[in-house]
Amino acid sequence: MIKVAILGPESTGKTELASQLAKHFKSPWVPEYAREYVENLKIPYTFDDVCNIALKQIEEEKYYENVSQNERFVFFDTDLIITKVWFEYCFKKIPEFLTDRMKSNYYDLYLLCTPDLPWEPDSVREHGNDREFFFEWYRREIEQTNKPYVIIDKTGFQRTQKAINALEILK
Protein backbone atom coordinates (compact mmCIF):
# COMPACT_ATOMS: atom_id res chain seq x y z
CA MET A 1 0.00 0.00 0.00
CA ILE A 2 1.45 3.36 -1.02
CA LYS A 3 0.95 5.95 1.71
CA VAL A 4 0.38 9.44 0.29
CA ALA A 5 0.33 12.59 2.41
CA ILE A 6 -1.38 15.67 1.02
CA LEU A 7 0.11 18.84 2.45
CA GLY A 8 -0.19 22.53 1.86
CA PRO A 9 -1.12 25.77 3.55
CA GLU A 10 -4.66 26.44 4.65
CA SER A 11 -7.30 26.71 1.94
CA THR A 12 -5.32 24.93 -0.79
CA GLY A 13 -7.81 22.16 -1.51
CA LYS A 14 -6.18 19.32 0.45
CA THR A 15 -9.42 17.78 1.66
CA GLU A 16 -11.08 17.98 -1.72
CA LEU A 17 -8.02 16.49 -3.39
CA ALA A 18 -7.79 13.64 -0.88
CA SER A 19 -11.46 12.84 -1.42
CA GLN A 20 -11.18 12.96 -5.23
CA LEU A 21 -8.06 10.78 -5.30
CA ALA A 22 -9.63 8.22 -2.99
CA LYS A 23 -12.67 8.08 -5.24
CA HIS A 24 -10.61 7.84 -8.43
CA PHE A 25 -8.33 5.09 -7.12
CA LYS A 26 -11.05 3.39 -5.03
CA SER A 27 -8.81 3.75 -1.99
CA PRO A 28 -9.29 4.91 1.60
CA TRP A 29 -8.49 8.38 2.79
CA VAL A 30 -7.99 9.81 6.26
CA PRO A 31 -9.57 13.22 6.93
CA GLU A 32 -7.70 15.95 8.76
CA TYR A 33 -8.36 15.43 12.46
CA ALA A 34 -7.08 18.88 13.50
CA ARG A 35 -10.01 20.63 11.84
CA GLU A 36 -12.59 18.49 13.66
CA TYR A 37 -10.76 18.85 16.97
CA VAL A 38 -10.31 22.64 16.82
CA GLU A 39 -13.88 23.23 15.59
CA ASN A 40 -15.14 21.58 18.79
CA LEU A 41 -13.03 23.67 21.17
CA LYS A 42 -14.70 26.43 23.14
CA ILE A 43 -11.39 28.20 23.83
CA PRO A 44 -8.23 28.78 21.77
CA TYR A 45 -6.14 25.65 21.25
CA THR A 46 -3.17 24.97 23.50
CA PHE A 47 0.08 23.01 23.28
CA ASP A 48 -1.73 20.04 24.83
CA ASP A 49 -4.46 20.26 22.21
CA VAL A 50 -1.90 20.08 19.41
CA CYS A 51 -0.32 17.09 21.21
CA ASN A 52 -3.74 15.38 21.15
CA ILE A 53 -4.04 16.12 17.43
CA ALA A 54 -0.58 14.67 16.78
CA LEU A 55 -1.34 11.54 18.79
CA LYS A 56 -4.51 10.97 16.76
CA GLN A 57 -2.54 11.38 13.53
CA ILE A 58 -0.03 8.79 14.75
CA GLU A 59 -2.89 6.45 15.68
CA GLU A 60 -4.30 6.74 12.14
CA GLU A 61 -0.86 6.07 10.63
CA LYS A 62 -0.37 3.00 12.81
CA TYR A 63 -3.76 1.67 11.80
CA TYR A 64 -2.70 1.71 8.14
CA GLU A 65 0.59 0.01 8.97
CA ASN A 66 -1.43 -3.05 9.98
CA VAL A 67 -4.29 -3.03 7.48
CA SER A 68 -4.46 -5.58 4.66
CA GLN A 69 -2.81 -4.62 1.41
CA ASN A 70 -5.96 -4.84 -0.74
CA GLU A 71 -5.86 -1.19 -1.77
CA ARG A 72 -3.05 0.32 -3.81
CA PHE A 73 -3.09 3.69 -2.00
CA VAL A 74 -4.16 5.35 1.20
CA PHE A 75 -4.45 9.14 1.22
CA PHE A 76 -3.90 11.29 4.29
CA ASP A 77 -5.34 14.80 4.38
CA THR A 78 -2.28 16.27 6.18
CA ASP A 79 0.50 14.65 8.17
CA LEU A 80 2.86 15.24 11.08
CA ILE A 81 4.94 17.76 9.12
CA ILE A 82 2.11 20.26 9.36
CA THR A 83 1.72 19.48 13.06
CA LYS A 84 5.45 19.90 13.63
CA VAL A 85 5.42 23.27 11.87
CA TRP A 86 2.43 24.33 13.97
CA PHE A 87 4.27 23.39 17.18
CA GLU A 88 7.31 25.40 16.10
CA TYR A 89 5.32 28.38 14.85
CA CYS A 90 2.87 28.66 17.75
CA PHE A 91 4.77 27.26 20.73
CA LYS A 92 8.47 27.31 19.75
CA LYS A 93 8.90 23.69 20.84
CA ILE A 94 8.18 20.20 19.52
CA PRO A 95 7.30 17.24 21.75
CA GLU A 96 9.79 14.40 21.67
CA PHE A 97 7.17 11.80 20.75
CA LEU A 98 6.48 13.71 17.53
CA THR A 99 10.15 13.97 16.59
CA ASP A 100 10.58 10.25 17.29
CA ARG A 101 7.59 9.28 15.13
CA MET A 102 8.72 11.46 12.25
CA LYS A 103 11.97 9.47 12.08
CA SER A 104 9.91 6.52 10.82
CA ASN A 105 9.60 8.18 7.37
CA TYR A 106 6.07 6.79 7.19
CA TYR A 107 4.96 8.27 3.87
CA ASP A 108 5.96 7.08 0.43
CA LEU A 109 4.97 10.23 -1.44
CA TYR A 110 3.96 13.78 -0.63
CA LEU A 111 1.60 15.91 -2.70
CA LEU A 112 2.28 19.55 -1.81
CA CYS A 113 -0.58 21.87 -2.75
CA THR A 114 0.30 25.40 -3.79
CA PRO A 115 -1.57 28.42 -2.43
CA ASP A 116 -2.88 29.39 -5.87
CA LEU A 117 -6.52 28.78 -4.95
CA PRO A 118 -8.53 31.67 -3.52
CA TRP A 119 -8.42 32.04 0.27
CA GLU A 120 -11.67 30.88 1.84
CA PRO A 121 -11.85 32.00 5.47
CA ASP A 122 -13.64 29.89 8.05
CA SER A 123 -13.74 29.52 11.83
CA VAL A 124 -10.56 27.39 11.95
CA ARG A 125 -8.25 28.99 9.38
CA GLU A 126 -5.79 31.56 10.69
CA HIS A 127 -3.11 32.61 8.21
CA GLY A 128 -4.57 33.70 4.88
CA ASN A 129 -1.79 36.21 4.29
CA ASP A 130 1.02 33.76 5.12
CA ARG A 131 0.29 30.91 2.76
CA GLU A 132 3.49 31.31 0.69
CA PHE A 133 5.52 31.39 3.92
CA PHE A 134 3.98 28.10 5.11
CA PHE A 135 4.20 26.53 1.63
CA GLU A 136 7.97 27.07 1.59
CA TRP A 137 8.31 25.80 5.17
CA TYR A 138 6.41 22.63 4.33
CA ARG A 139 8.56 22.17 1.21
CA ARG A 140 11.76 22.38 3.28
CA GLU A 141 10.38 19.89 5.80
CA ILE A 142 9.40 17.44 3.06
CA GLU A 143 12.82 17.75 1.45
CA GLN A 144 14.42 16.78 4.77
CA THR A 145 12.58 13.43 4.62
CA ASN A 146 14.33 12.53 1.36
CA LYS A 147 10.99 11.21 0.12
CA PRO A 148 9.59 12.11 -3.30
CA TYR A 149 7.09 14.90 -3.60
CA VAL A 150 5.04 16.50 -6.34
CA ILE A 151 3.89 20.09 -6.30
CA ILE A 152 0.19 20.25 -7.08
CA ASP A 153 -0.89 23.51 -8.67
CA LYS A 154 -3.55 24.70 -11.13
CA THR A 155 -7.26 24.67 -10.33
CA GLY A 156 -10.23 22.36 -10.63
CA PHE A 157 -9.86 19.39 -12.93
CA GLN A 158 -6.27 20.31 -13.88
CA ARG A 159 -5.21 20.24 -10.22
CA THR A 160 -6.76 16.83 -9.62
CA GLN A 161 -5.42 15.48 -12.91
CA LYS A 162 -1.88 16.54 -12.03
CA ALA A 163 -2.10 14.48 -8.83
CA ILE A 164 -3.65 11.51 -10.66
CA ASN A 165 -0.88 11.60 -13.27
CA ALA A 166 1.80 11.63 -10.55
CA LEU A 167 0.16 8.61 -8.89
CA GLU A 168 -0.41 6.68 -12.13
CA ILE A 169 3.37 6.50 -12.53
CA LEU A 170 3.53 4.57 -9.26
CA LYS A 171 0.96 1.94 -10.28
Image (cartoon, rainbow, N blue to C red):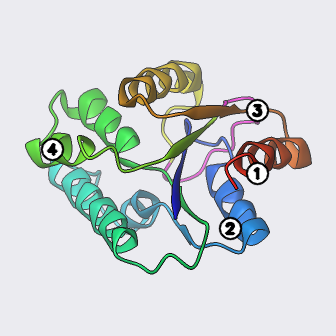
For the residues labelled 2 and 4, say whether their Cβ atoms are less than 8 Å apart: no
Horizontal and vertical percent for residue 41?
A: 33, 64
Work out how far the residue at label 3 is from the one at label 4, CA to CA, in angstroms.
Answer: 31 Å
Nearest-to-viewer mark from 4 and 1: 1
Q: Which badge, 1 or 2, comes first in the chain's sequence?
A: 2
Nearest-to-viewer mark from 2 and 3: 2
Q: Which badge, 2 or 3, comes first in the chain's sequence?
A: 2
Residue type of the residue flagged with mark 1: Glu
Q: Secondary structure at mark 3?
A: loop
Nearest-to-viewer mark from 3 and 1: 1
Front residue of 133/46: it is 133
Query: To which residue does mark 1 refer?
Result: 168
Query: To which residue does mark 2 refer?
Result: 22
Q: Based on the displayed image, in which of its 4 quarters is residue 118 positioned? A: top right
Q: Which mark is residue 153?
A: 3
In the image, the segment drawn in magenta is 114-124
Work out how far the residue at label 4 is from the one at label 1, CA to CA, in angstroms.
Answer: 32 Å
Q: Secondary structure at mark 2?
A: helix
Residue type of the residue flagged with mark 3: Asp
Relative to residue 115, is residue 76 drawn left or right? left
Q: Which badge, 4 or 1, comes first in the chain's sequence?
A: 4
